[in-house]
C-alpha cells in the first residue's frame, strides 16, 4: 500500500530519461540546476564537501540578502497534459524553500530561454508551502498540452527533484502516421495493465532509446504458480502492426523463455483478442525482430511472457488507420 497520489504512476514528462532539461536558473551556486530532472532517486553522502560547501544531488541557490526569488525553467522531454507535480526536497533539511510556485507554458518548435521567459504562463501551483527532506504532492489536472515548466523558490534554498507527471501528447505534424512505433510513449502509447511489476514498471518498455541496464526495463517477480506474466499497451492510435521488436538486452539470467503478442480493438471483450505473434522462443540479452503477418487493426496489444522475467523494450512498428489518425489529431487539437 502507498499514500502517493495515483497520478504519480503516470509518466514524468520532465525526466532526463525522456529528454527533459533545465534550460536556465537564476542561481545555482551550491548545486547544479540539472539535478532537478535526474531520473534516479536523490542520493546523499553526509560530510562530503566541495569548495562551495556540502555536495547535494539537487538544485541549491545562495542565501538571499535582498528581496527576490529564485527560478528555474525546464523544457519537458515529452510535451503533454499535466496531472500533478512533485516537489522533492530530499536531504534539504535546513536549506529548503518555505514556499514554491510552478507555472507552465506551451510554445512551438525549439525556443530560446529569452523566448520561453517571455511566454504567457499558466499557474499550476501558486505560492504553496513545502517541508524539508520530503516529497510534496500538488494535484494539477491541467487539460492543456504544455512544453515548458517554470519552478520558483520563495525566496531561495534547495530542491532535489521536480517531477511533472502526466500524459504525453505528440504533435501529429511531426509524425509519419503511416510508419511509426505504435507502442512508443512519445507517440502517445501507454501501459494500461500488467500482472506484476515487482522490480520495475512495464512503462519502461515504451521509453525512447535503448535501456542502459536491466533496471530500465520491465522485470517481474519469480512465479511459482505455473502461470505467466503479461502487460497491455494502449497504442498511439488504432493501427496495424507490421513488425514487433522484443528486446531482452541486459537481461541475461532473467529473460523470459518465450513471448506472445495479441491484439484487440475492444479490450472489454474477452473473445475479441486475435494473434499477432504466436508463442515464440526468446534469447537472453538479444534484440529480436519479428514480422507480423496479421493485417487486422488494433487499439491495444497484449504481451505475454512465459513464465516470468523481464524485457528491456517493446517496439510495435506499423501505421495508423484513418480512425487512428483522426483520434490522434483530435487529442492534440483538444489540448492545444
Image (spheres, rainbow, N blue to C red):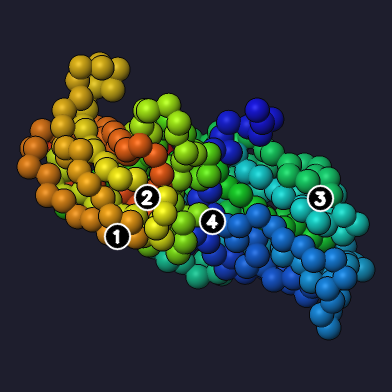
* Dot 3 or dot 2, earlier in sequence: 3
Report the residue marked by disc 1: 286
Q: Are marks 1 and 3 in contact (CB under 8 Å)?
A: no
Q: Quadrant of the C terminus?
A: top left
Q: Are marks 1 and 2 in contact (CB under 8 Å)?
A: yes
* Dot 1 or dot 3, earlier in sequence: 3
Label 2 residue SS: loop
Residue 255 image label: 2
* Dot 4 or dot 3, earlier in sequence: 4
Work out whether residue 14 or residue 224 is closer to the camera in this orientation and state it: 224
Few, some or many C-alpha atoms within 10 Å of disc 4 (few <14, some 14-19, many ≥20)? many
Residue 133 image label: 3
Q: How many marks?
A: 4
Q: Tell me if 32 is positioned left or right of 230 in this view.
A: right
Numbered disc in front, either 1 or 4: 1
Q: Residue 44's spot in the image, x, y percent?
A: 77, 63
- Residue at x 81% of width, y 56% of height: 91
Q: Tell me if 240 is positioned left or right of 133 in this view.
A: left
Few, some or many C-alpha atoms within 10 Å of disc 2 (few <14, some 14-19, many ≥20)? many
* Dot 1 or dot 2, earlier in sequence: 2
Label 1 residue SS: loop
Q: Residue furthest bottom?
A: 51
Label 3 vs label 2: CA separation?
Answer: 37 Å
Label 1 vs label 2: CA separation?
Answer: 9 Å
- Residue at x 78% of width, y 75% of height: 29
Report the residue marked by disc 4: 15
Label 4 vs label 2: CA separation?
Answer: 27 Å
Numbered disc in front, either 4 or 2: 2
* Residue 58 against residue 323 in the figure, above or below: below
Q: Quadrant of the N terminus?
A: top right
Res 150 quadrant in image: bottom right
Few, some or many C-alpha atoms within 10 Å of disc 1 (few <14, some 14-19, many ≥20)? some
Amino acid at each position: 500500500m502507498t499514500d502517493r497520489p495515483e497520478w504519480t504512476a503516470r509518466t514524468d514528462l520532465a525526466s532526463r530519461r525522456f529528454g527533459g532539461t533545465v534550460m536556465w536558473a537564476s542561481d545555482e551556486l551550491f548545486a547544479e540546476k540539472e539535478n532537478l530532472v535526474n531520473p534516479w532517486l536523490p542520493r546523499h553522502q553526509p560530510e562530503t564537501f566541495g569548495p562551495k560547501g556540502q555536495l547535494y544531488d539537487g538544485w541549491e541557490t545562495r542565501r538571499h540578502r535582498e528581496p527576490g526569488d529564485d527560478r528555474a525553467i525546464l523544457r519537458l522531454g515529452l510535451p503533454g497534459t499535466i496531472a500533478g507535480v512533485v516537489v522533492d526536497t530530499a536531504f534539504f533539511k535546513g536549506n529548503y524553500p518555505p514556499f514554491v510556485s510552478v507555472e507552465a507554458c506551451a510554445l512551438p518548435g525549439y525556443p530560446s530561454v529569452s523566448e520561453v521567459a517571455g511566454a504567457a504562463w499558466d499557474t499550476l501551483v501558486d505560492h504553496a508551502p513545502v517541508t524539508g527532506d520530503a516529497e510534496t504532492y500538488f494535484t494539477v489536472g491541467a487539460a492543456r498540452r504544455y512544453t515548458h515548466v517554470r519552478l520558483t523558490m520563495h525566496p531561495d534554498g534547495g530542491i532535489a527533484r521536480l517531477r511533472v507527471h502526466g500524459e504525453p501528447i505528440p504533435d501529429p505534424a511531426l509524425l509519419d502516421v503511416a510508419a511509426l512505433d505504435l507502442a512508443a510513449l512519445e507517440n502517445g502509447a501507454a501501459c494500461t495493465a500488467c500482472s506484476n511489476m515487482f522490480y520495475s514498471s512495464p512503462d519502461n518498455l515504451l521509453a525512447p532509446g535503448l535501456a542502459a541496464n536491466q533496471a530500465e526495463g520491465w522485470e517481474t517477480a519469480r512465479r511459482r504458480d505455473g502461470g505467466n506474466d503479461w502487460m497491455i499497451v494502449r497504442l498511439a492510435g488504432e493501427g496495424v502492426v507490421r513488425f514487433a521488436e522484443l528486446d531482452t538486452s541486459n537481461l541475461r539470467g532473467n529473460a523470459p523463455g518465450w513471448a506472445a503478442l495479441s491484439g484487440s480493438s475492444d479490450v472489454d471483450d474477452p473473445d475479441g483478442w486475435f494473434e499477432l505473434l504466436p508463442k515464440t522462443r526468446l534469447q537472453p540479452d538479444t534484440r529480436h525482430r519479428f514480422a507480423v503477418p496479421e493485417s487486422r487493426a488494433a487499439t491495444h496489444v497484449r504481451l505475454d511472457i512465459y513464465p516470468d522475467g523481464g524485457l528491456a523494450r517493446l517496439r510495435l512498428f506499423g501505421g495508423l488507420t484513418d480512425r487512428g489518425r483522426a483520434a490522434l489529431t483530435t487529442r492534440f487539437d483538444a489540448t492545444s
